[in-house]
Structure formats: structure tokens, C-alpha cells
Amino acid sequence: MPLYRFEQNDIFHNRIETHPQCNFILHNGNVYFNNRPQISGSFTSSVPNVPSGYINLYELNADRSTTHHTFDSSVDDIDKRSNPPKKSLIFPYLVKDGTFTDFKTISLTTVDGVNVDAHTAAEYGAILTGSYPLSATIVKEYFAADHVVSSRTTLSHSIAEENLRPVSDDHGIQIKSKLYNKIKALENVLDYYLYLSPHYAYSTASSPFVGWNKGVQELGLVSVPSIFYGSSIEKGTVNLKFYTTGTLLAELKDSRKNGELVQVGPTGSNESGSVAGVVLYNEGFLILTGSWDLSEGLHTENYTGSIDKPKWICFGQSISGTITAPSSSFELNFSGTNHVPVMTMLAHARKGQLNHSNNPSYIEYKQTMTPISSSIKYLEQPELKLANLVSSSYSDPTASFRKHTFISEIGVYDRDRNLIAIAKPATPVKKTEERDFTFKLKLDF
């Protein structure tokens, strides 16, 4: 089998920009992603072993039972190999040693009444395990008015405003509620995007032209994991729809491509043309601030734990698991931006090359191929005839003999001659001595 080295101009690298589309339907605690149906497997009721609307990272344990396998130090290693667990979940593990290698996410355990991480508490040589599958979906959270100040007050040692200090845990780490962390942590990010729109301003301290403070303002936060959109959300593709009893109540779209979520429909709807929130394209957040009644007093439902009017800040709140709003449904659409590195390789089959094969079918049928051997010599058959594969218009005589082969596979090797990829054409390509071919191979990373 001949090997050819790629020349300098035979390999080049580029990057393909793709825009995967995402559609989420939210209704009464359920999420449906890209209209994917719920599939039952042999060992789990939901393939790939995650709830509807979730993505299974790595797609491990796609159809396995939830029986976990644990290591038993009392069982001999030979017994473990001869009696492996059946239908157990794949899980990551590592052995504690002196390298301080640990999982990114750790759990806490109690030792002598003090909380310590599991890695520190484990003995050297102990096996530390994680779990699969890893899954992700969108999350919607509602933040009531004065949410930042209220969350800080409940955690402080003193109610006095000048003494608001968060409580610390056993490691000296400040304990802050999710409400305080998530909104306050976005302050710098929001202010960074002020060049796009003043609606990104966190407070009047960020921009004197606004009259709000997002630490006090009632709002909603939609979090989209990056596994759904890639590098960033594509500008101009975000679309939110609010339905009641199956009828479109209102629609938002970032039609200006500057991050503003503008109410674009239905025509003549309450506050049509108003900005109801902003999009953080690179971070995957949608901050909804629209608090007007979308139904103009015609509909009420349990959106925030109590009966309320349909508002944009209530969008998708029913997927939180604690809110029931069976008469309302929500739809979120957007496209992502994903950059895929691509290596393009040009493999040449030049004239006069690759016209011989070591395949036994290349030899004419019914010939003696057994080598001549004795105690003093080994000689292969010297007069073997090649099969004439040239087609003829007549059954006899056959056409004149011409060497040709069929290229069915192209192997790609590394510098150590390890096979790393195989390319196959849709049908074998006929190669004659006067033909010159160049195969274009692409490899995505």
C-alpha cells in the first residue's frame, strides 16, 4: 500500500460558522426542545436518560438503569472482573493520591462536626466517584421587588443597613442567596453593554438617563446554558411568545439587533413597541423587565405564587416546578453561533500511479498462485496474469488489456504512521493510468 506525504499546499485550516436553531416550548412545568418526542428505552423511560427539554452531555448512560455500582474493598479484584455489575450507570472516578487531582464539583461531608470537602476527608488510595449523565436545560427565575436588599438583610448579622454583612460558612466563605448572587453579579456585564442600548443600565449610577435599579426592580431571568447556542446567541434571532388558552397574547423580538427585546405583536396589543427586556448574547441570559398587563385585564393566573396578571416578567415561570399555570404556555426561539475548526486535506492520485493492487481479485481467476518452495529456494509464480477488467461490446473477444483499479478508501496517517481517519467515496472511483484525481477531505474538530 503506497503512502504519500501531504505537501505544503495540500493542507489548510479554516473555521466554519454555524447557527444551530433552538426552539423551546414551556407549559405547566414541562420543557420541550426542538419538538423532540419522549422516547422510552429498554432500561429507562426517557432516552437519552434525561427529562424532556434537557440535553445529555456526552450522551452517556443513554439507555441504562439507575442501578449504581459501588466499589467494595472486601471483594477481591478477580471477583469484580468475573462478576461485573449488570445495567449499572457509567460514572467517572479517580483514586486519591498526592497530585491533588479532584473533580471540578465537590461535595461536603461532616468530620468531627465540621464541614469539609469529600476529597480532604478521604483516605489516600480511596476511590472518589462522580455521576453521569450530565444534563442541562433552560431555567426561568422570578425576582420580586427589592430582591437584592431583601436577600442581603436575611443573611446579615444585623438589620442595620450599615452593618449588612453576609454570614460565613465553616470555610470562611460568604453565604449569599441565589437572588443576591445572580442579579448583582450581572451588574458589570450589563453596564459593559451600555454602548448598545441604555436599557442595559443596571441603575442610575450607571447611566443618568434611566430611572431604575435592577437590584430593586421586579424582573425575570431566563438562563440558557452555552451547550445550546455555542459561542454566543445570534443577534436578531431571539423571539419570545406568550400564549393564554392557545391564543398569542404578546410577542417579543430583538428586531433592532442591539439586545433590546421589543414587543412587536400582535398589532395593537398593550404597550406594543415598548422594550420589555434585554439579551446578553455572549453570556446566555435574557433579563425581562416588562411589568405591564398583557391581557388588559382579561386573564389572571398563578404566575408568581399568587394570582397575577400575565406580564413579561412572568414568562416561563411555570417551569420552575412550584408554579402551576395550565392555561398559559410560552415559546422561546433563537439561533446560536458555533465556530467549528475544519482541516481540509487534498489527496492526489496522479497519472501513472495507483494502478496496481495486491488484492487477490486483481489476479486472473484459475491460476496457480502457490509459491514454489524447497529446501534451497522460495519462488513465487513469475507468470501470473492480471485480470482484464476493461469492458467490451462483445462477449468474445475481450477488449485490449489496460491496467486500472478502483479507489474505495483513503487513509490518513499521522507522522508515526498511525491511522487516524478513513475517507470513503460514495462509490469506488475508477482509476486508469491516464487519469489524474484530487480528493478533497474535510475533518471537523
Image: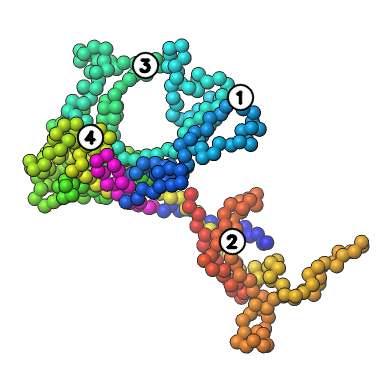
Residue under numbered circle 1 = 74
Whether the magenta-drawn stretch holds residue 240 is answered as: no
Q: Are there few (<14), some (14-19), or many (20+) residues within 10 Å of tag 4?
A: some
Nearer mark to the viewer, of 2 and 4: 4
First in sequence: mark 1 or mark 2?
1
- Which range is magenta? 17-33
Compared with residue 129, is residue 27 higher up or lower down, i.e. above or below? below
Tag 1's secondary structure?
loop
Q: Amino acid at mark 3?
A: Asp
Q: Nearer the viewer, residue 198 or 90?
A: 90
Question: Nearest the camera: 247 or 183?
Answer: 247
Q: Which mark is residue 323?
A: 4
Please report the residue visible at 27 percent of the width from the left and 35 percent of the height from the top: 320
Between discs 4 and 3, the one toward the N terminus: 3
Q: Residues within 10 Å of mark 3 (few under 14, many from 20)?
A: few
Label 3 and label 1: CA atoms lie apart by 37 Å
For the residues marked 2 and 4, what is the alpha-carbon distance in whole angstroms?
57 Å
Q: Is residue 28 magenta?
A: yes
Q: Tag on residue 169?
A: 3
Residue 247 against residue 89 in the figure, above or below: below
Question: Which residue is denoted by mark 2 in the rendering?
Answer: 410
